[in-house]
Image (tube, coloured by chain):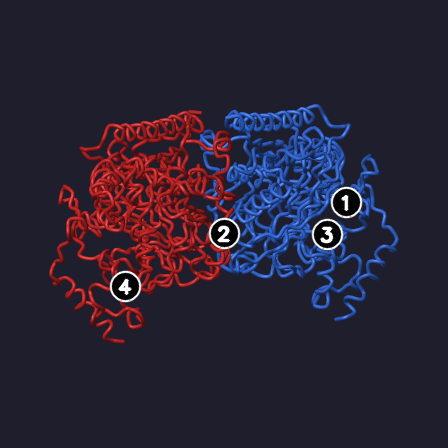
Chain colours: A red, B blue
Amino acid sequence: MAPCVSLLLPVFAILATLPVIRSAHTFFPRPSYDQSLARQPDASKPKIPYKAHYFPQVLDHYTFQPKSSKIFYQKYLVNSHYWRRGAPIFVYTGNEGDIEWFASNTGFLLDIAPKFRALLVFIEHRFYGESMPFGNKSYKSAETLGYLNSQQALADFAILIRSLKHNLSSEASPVVVFGGSYGGSELKIPSQLLMLNGCSKWPSFLLSLSVLAAWFRLKYPHIAIGALASSAPILQFDDITPWSSFYDTVSQDFKEASLNCYEVIKGSWAELEALSAQKEGLTELSRTFRACQFAFDTSMRIWPSMQNLQKKIPKCPKINLLDPFFRDLHSLDSVWDWLWSAFVYTAMVNYPTEANFMMPLPAYPVQAMCKIIDGFPSGASKIISVFAAASLYYNYSRAEKCFKLEHGPDTHGLHGWDWQACTEMVMPMSCSQESMFPPSGFSYKEFAEDCMKTFGAKPRPHWITTEFGGKRIDRVLKRSGGNIIFSNGMQDPWSRGGVLKNISSTIIALVTEKGAHHVDFRFATKDDPEWLKELRRQEVEIIQGWIDQYYADLKRLNNE
Amino acid sequence: MAPCVSLLLPVFAILATLPVIRSAHTFFPRPSYDQSLARQPDASKPKIPYKAHYFPQVLDHYTFQPKSSKIFYQKYLVNSHYWRRGAPIFVYTGNEGDIEWFASNTGFLLDIAPKFRALLVFIEHRFYGESMPFGNKSYKSAETLGYLNSQQALADFAILIRSLKHNLSSEASPVVVFGGSYGGSELKIPSQLLMLNGCSKWPSFLLSLSVLAAWFRLKYPHIAIGALASSAPILQFDDITPWSSFYDTVSQDFKEASLNCYEVIKGSWAELEALSAQKEGLTELSRTFRACQFAFDTSMRIWPSMQNLQKKIPKCPKINLLDPFFRDLHSLDSVWDWLWSAFVYTAMVNYPTEANFMMPLPAYPVQAMCKIIDGFPSGASKIISVFAAASLYYNYSRAEKCFKLEHGPDTHGLHGWDWQACTEMVMPMSCSQESMFPPSGFSYKEFAEDCMKTFGAKPRPHWITTEFGGKRIDRVLKRSGGNIIFSNGMQDPWSRGGVLKNISSTIIALVTEKGAHHVDFRFATKDDPEWLKELRRQEVEIIQGWIDQYYADLKRLNNE
């Protein structure tokens, strides 16, 4: 198997020198956009004005066994440029990925730091990025993954923040926590988990740990004076929010952009199914969708580093790096997944300006996608239409020569989020008749069986609502809790699982009709619409209010 | 070793038939009291109007490993006599002992249940009473004891309450949690742990898990609409409350009763030390203090049952059941411990009426003790004076013929509370120059070394304040939290670690100058003073307000 390794770099070299295959207009639409926004080769590791630190963290906060006292190193980033002792500390409660990626996609904090003279701290979530308690064996089994859950992560934040304040001799600094959602690269789920979260063959979308900031304020009000939770679906659990709401919202976004667009997408699944059932159907689909060999996706930063991956290459039983550049698909699933991801993520990031969050995209990309679909003559192949639309998502920068529709074997170990979804973060989802996706339900039984098979773990579907609440949240938080902003953009499919109405005078819902997934957390740009500027202005004003109140309390208590 | 077992009952029989040794007046004071209050032989297992149930509980809520999904059976008691579906549920969050004992000492809930038509539920704390996750091996080592901590216990309560409401089809019932302190038998700490909590040779006093009700409301506001935390020292951790406050308050109670009494006790320790250093000093002390052989203390209900204990008897290497009835003490420590416990517990239960909580005692027992001391002529032996005073505590019922000053070997396994004190519940205590106890400091280093030696576990002295807060509590809870009553009696040494001032309009401190340790939780009696009736009246009124508000919210939301 040694050649398998030695051929790795040469194969990449071959790929790089292949002639560029120019696509037809319908396959590779080229809307007008600023080339500077396109993904650059080095964009995978953006430069950010933060210094990395590593905190010795306790593995298990909730059993006091000797083995659980094991220490691992938790990464956190600090920017102290604007700060002076005693001034506020703004903490981003890291979620399911590399913390540097979050930092680079949360420009809002850098924008507002000077006004508050704030220290900025981005704490990486355990079991993601570099914060691996068991190194490259962290995803090995339920024995190691067991320590990956939100309660342990919240305790990590609490301990780290307290220690940081102590070390800075700034224990009186007010702390405000910020949580947005997953900030970066496209996440893929191992094929065996595709059925886990309802809508049968389709993956759940991994953008939900923004809930941590809200939960942190609720559980640790003595550590954070307030929280801005942007696009936090804290009501997406159990039976609080209708299970079809997520995909219904995606569908509504497209329907609002164009009824024809919605109908073409809705009709495309049957056409795809019919074609794939034909002889040579998959071969035709492979050509149409320009499927290329999956080898190594360096953007998968949540998995072990390339170096670790290479160690595993000798075992690669199914990867043949000498496979032809284009290859036949094994099943229709990967095409569905590819399209599905494009539509869902585009709805999530339906931002009012050009942006490069999940992928480089133009302003209002849902509208742009629908414009492509609407550009086809009536009666055109729905398959070609949806491919062209999805290409906007995957190839707005025109850098792609083929598309990696299929994943390689899971040589990386099990995926952190899948573990969380299979244990605590159970978010049932279904597709209604009204959605543009094929209708399907959610079977807890099947879900639990899959989880048991995959991880040997049984999901606890009611655990999150027992531990953090959510049911009748307005009534509960009216009599406890305070100083939380729940910000949601109604374009975002996660918004329906968020808090959309004020709960009390200090638990505020800021809702924007045109907003998408934590649009407020992005760097301000000159093209931002008024409603976005106003949203951020309100957030800053409310946070300023918390901080003023904190210092006033402090002064009054010190004088007593 | 078989005779060791077979002799058990005969020896008890011999003890029972020994002629009663009548004490001199100064040794066995007999103040006037109602004989019916004296401890009866069957009082160790009081009859209570509750039905016992057992709930299948998850061992570890915070790691999702297969082994942590182990189930154990958690005991809880229910009285549904006054309840109808939809009416409130009052939950007592069990603390460090047998739940039946708590139930029998929390008559307040039975007194108020008819008014609220409340369901009463007493949930036993894991690792106490019958709720042993690993049976009689539960205290075996840190591997098993690791799961004994307050966070796991709170999650137990949350899960059990939710399940109970579901099973009762009464999910809309408001839940109010109640927490008092340890409700019963005298707790002993294995000798190796005597130095753990400061004041050098003396044990900490184990009455602190009343904090659970307050913490539960703070962490689980979605499950409990309010909490009445009686005598909850939630500020006794870390450096929030001066470490000497506990013993200073005990001392103050005695000083207020009589300056002479305080001075006699304060001077007695040196006299005891001087006597014990003399030849035959310990023999003299043994006679003076009527030390009897410790064999088996059936009142130790927090340890494994007698049945389990008997299984271990064959191994009893140090117990000789044929020892003489009186025996020489091995060191002065046990005398100090015996006196110390008498003074501290008496201060804690300095109730305004006769009561049988820790021990049967007259009304205002501190004053009664001081009356005994003040009855000695000036210049009398301080040793004899303090023995006479302490006898009020140990022998008010006149049933004791000798006193078990020394503990037997720890055949019971390690003690649950010691584990908690050595890991999370670190409450540093010291004795100041002003206290009536010998001055001493608290050394965290020594404490940690002892814990490591005993359990192989390192204490986390800042964990409780990180997890539950406490520092600057007024400022923190003013902006979050609500619906908590902190009730404290200033006679109670724990009161200084409690919340003694209102924090907000819904976080209320009820303080009584003459109150002792959760006096409000006892059954009402015809002799209760006005201030106690008023305290309970206020509590009922506030709880009624929470419940009215809850139903009003429910009605309003249902109409929306």
Q: Chain of mark 3?
A: B
**Image x and y of residue B224, in percent:** 56, 36
Q: Nearer the viewer, residue A27 or A249?
A: A27
* SS under mark 1: loop
In the image: residue B434, left or right of residue B352: left
- Spatial separation of the CA atoms under disc 2 and disc 1: 46 Å
**Observer-nearest of A23 and B484:** A23
Q: Residues within 10 Å of mark 3 (few under 14, many from 20)?
A: many
Could you say which disc has been placed on residue B46 in the image?
1
Q: Which residue is mark 3?
A: B285
- Alpha-carbon distance for marks 2 and 4? 36 Å
Q: Are marks 3 and 4 on the same chain?
A: no
Q: Amino acid at mark 4?
A: Glu
Mark 4 vs mark 1: tell me if same chain: no
**Which residue is disc 2 drawn over?**
A444
**Badge 4 is on which residue?**
A280
Asked whether residue A447 appears in the rendered view, the answer is: yes
Q: Is residue A219 above or below residue B314?
A: above
Counting residues from the start of the chain, the first of labels 2 and 4 encountered is 4
Q: Secondary structure at mark 2?
A: helix
Pair 2/4: label in front? 4
Residue A354 position in % (x across, y down) = 20, 40
* Dot placed on the residue nearer the N-terminal end, 1 or 3: 1
Amino acid type of the residue that numbered disc 1 sits on in the rendered structure: Pro
